[in-house]
């Protein structure tokens, strides 16, 4: 079965390259091809999960597709893009690839060739976002209709159904390998699918608001809430509560100012009914069970203890990320000058028997320590530039609903990158971050 799958993938891409060679890589067709890849990304993620969890194949279709997207985007910006800012974009791309070459040489010097592929693969995954930011910016600037809001919502709903349907049928993959409960449908990692659901959630709510279809809204929000509580991770629930709190406060203020008291009473009735539903349903969910499992494991008698003990707080709230941060920081401090400048890479304590490949899972710190001062400056320089452009664009937007949606998504990207990770460094997630920061940022 595994041999058949590999043969199928190789044949598929051989045919694809032949088609491209016959003229598919024209400007219009390239844009459509990238958009098609995006629409099919949930399907590719499902196939990747099947290959990893059922067939035990590391050579995944998702990895290949995203590498091909990079090649197509680079081809576009180098040979097709004609705007006057092209030289600046090429300079930014050039700095990334020069850095990655130096990073590879540092790995060879401080470790050896046996780990080079592993280190380079992770480095490319990390720098997937800045590469996509630069190239998507160029594509959006010349193609205003590239990946419109409807496309993003279609992809989002496919992700929701890719969790919901398998979970209802009881055939979804587990969120956690051991101890905790939860299901992620036909996807591979709980953290990545949680991040996608979280950062695109404001656009999903904006879509429902604009559709003004009560039945559709109830059904889709029901599926969303089911997915959030089924996965069992904190990120989507945290995002949902932030969004709903902001939306409800703004709507209450609006109703009070307009003196629309009937709708205000109806709103409070809905809030009370929904709260009652959560009180009844929540104890039956994977999220609630995971909280119980976690507290039992920590031998916590009172939730108050979690917030008065640093280690308990780290373990319960941050899943020991602060501990991993301390460990990696110590390794970084003990590294040589080259590693401090260009990064210690993704394998820590390489010369010792206790080598570790554990990430901190707090994106900003992982970028800093894995890629050193130079890598961090290049990466964050590009990221902050596009973040600034998007905030500037959003500030000038006239549509208040759209403006609030953008601000919420940007806030979640910034917060979740720090708290839960897997936002800036996972290609399956960062491609959507790139869309948010470029489609909204082109003025």
Image (tube, rainbow, N blue to C red):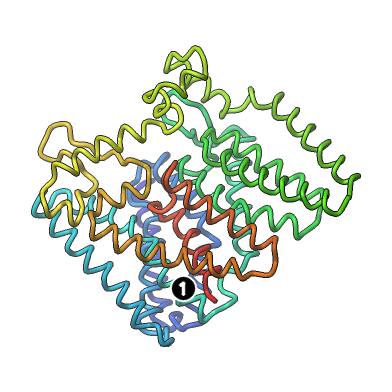
- Image location (x, y in percent) of residue 6: 35, 54
Question: So how many labels did they put on this image?
Answer: 1
- Residue drawn 61% across and 51% down? 201
Residue 188 is left or right of residue 152, and the answer is left
Secondary structure category for the residue under label 1: helix
User: Where does label 1 land, which residue?
Assistant: 137
- Residue drawn 58% across and 57% down? 407
Residue 202 is left or right of residue 309, and the answer is right
- Residue drawn 37% across and 44% down? 362
Quadrant that contains the C terminus = bottom right
Closer to the camera, 440 or 163?
440
Closer to the camera, 397 or 273?
397
- Image location (x, y in percent) of residue 280: 71, 24
- Image location (x, y in percent) of residue 308: 44, 22
Q: In which quarter of the image is residue 19?
A: bottom left
Residue 225 is left or right of residue 233, and the answer is right
- Image location (x, y in percent) of residue 400: 69, 63
Closer to the camera, 133 or 119?
133
Residue at the right extreme of this rendering: 262
- Residue drawn 87% across and 46% down? 263
Closer to the camera, 429 or 86?
86
Is residue 238 placed above or below 74 in the rendered structure? above
């Amino acid at each position: 079965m595994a041999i058949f799958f590999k043969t199928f993938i190789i044949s598929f891409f051989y045919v694809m390259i032949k088609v491209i060679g016959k003229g598919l890589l024209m400007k219009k067709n390239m844009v459509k091809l990238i958009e098609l890849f995006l629409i099919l990304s949930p399907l590719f993620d499902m196939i990747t999960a099947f290959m990893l969890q059922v067939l035990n194949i590391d050579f995944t279709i998702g990895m290949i597709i995203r590498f091909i997207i990079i090649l197509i985007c680079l081809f576009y910006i180098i040979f097709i893009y004609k705007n006057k800012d092209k030289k600046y974009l090429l300079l930014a791309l050039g700095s990334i690839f020069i850095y990655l070459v130096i990073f590879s040489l540092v790995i060879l010097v401080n470790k050896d060739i046996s780990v080079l592929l592993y280190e380079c693969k992770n480095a490319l995954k990390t720098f997937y976002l800045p590469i996509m930011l630069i190239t998507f910016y160029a594509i959006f600037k010349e193609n205003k209709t590239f990946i419109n809001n409807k496309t993003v919502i279609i992809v989002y709903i496919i992700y929701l159904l890719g969790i919901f349907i398998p979970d209802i049928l009881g055939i979804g993959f587990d969120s956690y390998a051991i101890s905790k409960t939860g299901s992620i449908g036909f996807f591979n990692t709980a953290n990545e699918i949680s991040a996608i659901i979280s950062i695109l959630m404001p656009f999903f709510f904006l879509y429902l608001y604009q559709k003004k279809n009560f039945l559709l809204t109830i059904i889709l929000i029901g599926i969303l809430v089911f997915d959030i509580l089924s996965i069992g991770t904190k990120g989507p629930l945290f995002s949902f509560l932030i969004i709903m709190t902001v939306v409800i406060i703004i709507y209450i203020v609006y109703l009070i100012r307009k003196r629309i008291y009937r709708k205000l009473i109806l709103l409070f009735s809905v809030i009370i009914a929904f709260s009652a539903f959560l009180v009844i349903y929540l104890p039956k969910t994977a999220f609630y069970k995971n909280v119980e499992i976690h507290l039992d494991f920590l031998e916590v008698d009172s939730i108050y203890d979690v917030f008065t003990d640093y280690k308990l707080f780290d373990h319960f709230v941050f899943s020991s990320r602060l501990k991993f941060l301390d460990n990696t920081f110590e390794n970084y401090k003990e590294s040589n000058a080259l590693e401090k400048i260009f990064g210690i890479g993704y394998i820590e304590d390489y010369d010792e028997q206790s080598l570790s490949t554990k990430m901190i899972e707090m994106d900003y710190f992982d970028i800093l320590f894995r890629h050193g001062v130079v890598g961090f400056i290049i990466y964050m320089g590009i990221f902050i530039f596009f973040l600034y452009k998007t905030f500037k664009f959003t500030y000038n937007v006239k549509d208040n609903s759209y403006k609030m949606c953008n601000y919420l998504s940007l806030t979640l990207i910034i917060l979740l990158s720090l708290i839960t990770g897997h936002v800036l460094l996972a290609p399956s997630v960062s491609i959507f971050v790139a869309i948010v920061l470029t489609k909204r940022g082109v003025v």
